[in-house]
Image: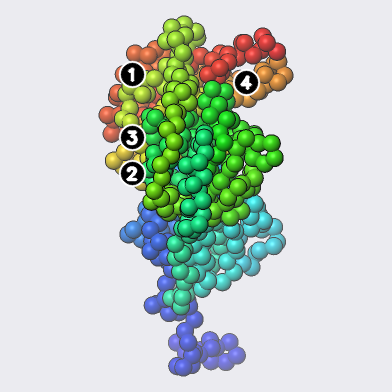
Amino acid sequence: MTHTGPHALPRTSPAAAPRPSEDPEWRTAAEEAVAVLAAAGVRRCYTVPGESFLELADALERHADIQLVSTRHEGGAAFMAEAEAKLTGVPAVAAATRGPGAGNLAVGVHTARQDSTPMVVFLGQVTTDHLGREAFQEVDLAAFYTPITKWTTTVTRADRLAETTAQALRTATTGRPGPVAVVVPGDLFGRRVPPPAALPGAAPPAPPLGEDERDRLAAWLVGAERPVIVAGGGARSARDELVAVAERFNTGVYTSWRRQDVFPNHHPLYLGHLGLGCPAPVLAALESADAVLVVGSRLSEITSQSYRLPAAGPGAAATVAQIDIDPHQIGAATGVWLGAVADARRALAALVEVPAVPPDRDYTAAHDAWVRASTPPPEAAAHAGAGLHPWAVVEAMRAALPEDTVVTNDAGNFAAFLHRGWWYRHPRTQLAPTSGAMGYAVPAAVAAKLAAPHRTVVAVAGDGGVLMTGQELETAARLGLAVTVVVFQNGLYGTIAMHQARELGRTAAVDIGGPLDLASYARGLGAAGRTATTPGELADALAEAVAAEGPTLIDVRTDPDIISPEASLSGLLGGA
């Protein structure tokens, strides 16, 4: 049909360049971004699909090298991406739609920020022509996410999405790792764009330790009388080098909050975990140290025992040196005698090469203090209260599970027993949020099993946390993932009950009912469910779960009065 007159369609000159939507050789902006992700080694994206990123989900689904995982809640998706990146060191992706989706995703993104975990987040926004009108579910996502990410940006041109994706990956993995959020108006993903002319390059190699710094640190460690090392998540990829430095300089090692797997806990130079409620005998070696080398730890509030240790400065007994990839962390928590901006692995490898003859220091007493703290007291075995003693649950896990099990743990007072009683003998076996986020364990276990299908993966949670994200058992069942979820069910928000009892002498809003039939809950989601009220039932349930081909939840009824390794709830209330 020929169009004539004032309403005729405009003709395209043969010399005119085709518009993106008219060139069949050009890919969509979403397809170009996904190609960048795949080339960087990203293997999974976790999401609840939304209308603001239809073409992105489609491009991810169709790419041969990336698995698109549909979850039951955006919070679960974010925790999964964070856990996979923490386990593998390679960023994973989480995607959410505007407003409600982005809000739900935020807890896991904050976890990645506090845990220094690289991940890339795509947030679908309202369409370009509706921006700023308080359109359906519109939120200023850049303002929302900036405080909880390493970098947040809004893409305004479809042909810049691939470039921005490459920059997001670079930023997430350079220096101190962290999450990056890319906000994209929903109408940009499907636009066809030319191939990107150039993309930001990969991150440069992490800096090494300078020769002068190396020699000064070596002489300092040799000359000290009571040196110790505090190792954090930045040393996760430097485990062998950390062990070699500890042995070369005969120096005891502490691990920072929820980073217990960076050093073998059974090693005679291991001095303990700087976590919540750290026993005084375990802290003694750190309090009396005259030299403290901090490697890859930002000395968070919990690791530093409320910013008290290691003490440095006038009147302090110790000098502190710090090695960290991020210059902003050097000396941020305490004064340092020497601060070196360097990659932990390269720095420790350099230190090992220095010939050193340290004095014959004896850390036996300090190591034994940790062993005693991690050993169940006699009364735990003879416990006759209303439910299993939490120590008994950890003991059963130690008896039934392989030593290299990947343990994901939630927030809650039950975790104090896990942190004490489970010894991390192998690298990359602990996935735990330093942010203290509830609901982490089950989604993290799903991601861990996807990323490492040959590993035994066990999630440990309380009844409060498991009912926040336990619906991700359906995700595990749908994907055929053999994960085990051990639930300490005591009918309480135990951590808050403990604080209330200690500070106020009474409790409020911490009774969450029960006992609930969590085994039936699991079966309703397609997983196996078992209930354990005795040590024998728990042992049998764990043996079955480890051998199962799909997910299993074990509902362990624990005594609500045993509120921490040192205290009972009734004792705290009575004392108050």
The residue labelled by disc 1 is 539
Q: Residue 536 is drawn in which quadrant? A: top left
Nearer-N-terminus badge (4/1): 4
Question: Marks 4/2: CA distance?
Answer: 36 Å
Q: Amino acid at mark 4?
A: Met
The residue labelled by disc 2 is 452
- Secondary element at image label 3: loop
Mark 1 surroundings: few (<14), some (14-19) or many (≥20) residues within 10 A? some
Nearer-N-terminus badge (4/2): 2
Image location of residue 372, percent across then percent down:
45, 19
Q: Does 567 sit left or right of 215 as displayed?
A: right
The residue labelled by disc 3 is 404
Q: Is residue 236 above or below residue 360?
A: below
- At 55% from the left and 19% from the top, the residue drawn is 564
Nearer-N-terminus badge (1/2): 2
Image location of residue 203, percent across then percent down:
47, 63
- At 53% from the left and 71% from the top, the residue drawn is 160
Residue contact at pointers 4 and 1, CB within 8 angstroms: no
Question: Marks 3/4: CA distance?
Answer: 32 Å
Q: Amino acid at mark 1?
A: Ala
Res 342 seen here: no
Q: Which one is in front in this view, the residue at disc 3 or the one at disc 4? A: 3
